[in-house]
Image (spheres, rainbow, N blue to C red):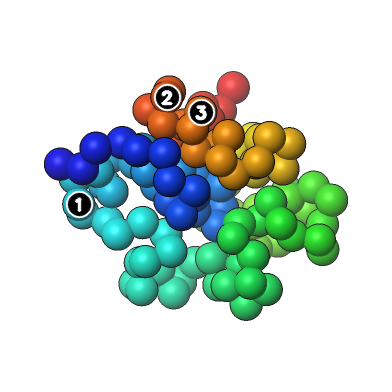
């Protein structure tokens, strides 16, 4: 099993932190950036097309939830089932930066902020 480490390259396009994800740590997933099977993910594809590291760099929308690619029905179901608040992750990255986000998520051993 991999160890949780601070690594900004493990921040997914949607704001999840792969570096603390159980699937990544158990080596069942390569993480967002290296997952060639994740071509279905419209958020990942959009970020790659715009050369953005994550939705936190998007200039098309002031609020990430206004984006139909980011805030679609699948994302809402995922957020509900896993009690995940990816929007809070993106907001944190915008405010505090990628390095601080990766450090915080590593310290808390979380891959996402819990939905409240």
Foreground of the two, 60 or 85: 60
- Name the residue carrying label 1: 27
Quadrant showing the N terminus: top left
Q: Element at badge 2?
A: helix
**Image x and y of residue 36, in percent:** 36, 73
Residue 107 to residue 25: above or below: above
Outermost left residue: 1
Foreground of the two, 99 or 52: 99
Residue 34 to residue 27: above or below: below
Residue 90: name its quadrant. Answer: top right
**Image x and y of residue 84, in percent:** 51, 35
* Contact (Cβ within 8 Å) of mark 2 with mark 3: yes
Residue depicted at x 49% and y 48%:
8
- Name the residue carrying label 3: 104
Badge 1 crowding class, 10 Å Cα cut-off, few under 14, some 14 to 19, many 20 or more, is: few
Residue 115 to residue 19: above or below: above
């Amino acid at each position: 099993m991999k160890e949780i480490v601070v690594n900004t390259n493990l921040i997914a396009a949607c704001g999840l932190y792969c570096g603390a994800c159980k699937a990544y740590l158990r080596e069942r997933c390569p993480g967002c950036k290296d997952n060639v099977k994740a071509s279905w993910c419209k958020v990942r594809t959009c970020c790659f097309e715009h050369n953005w590291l994550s939705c936190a760099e998007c200039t098309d929308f002031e609020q990430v939830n206004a984006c139909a690619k980011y805030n679609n029905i699948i994302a809402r179901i995922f957020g509900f089932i896993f009690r995940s608040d990816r929007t809070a992750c993106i907001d944190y990255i915008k405010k505090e930066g990628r390095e601080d986000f990766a450090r915080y998520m590593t310290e808390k051993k979380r891959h996402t902020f819990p939905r409240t």
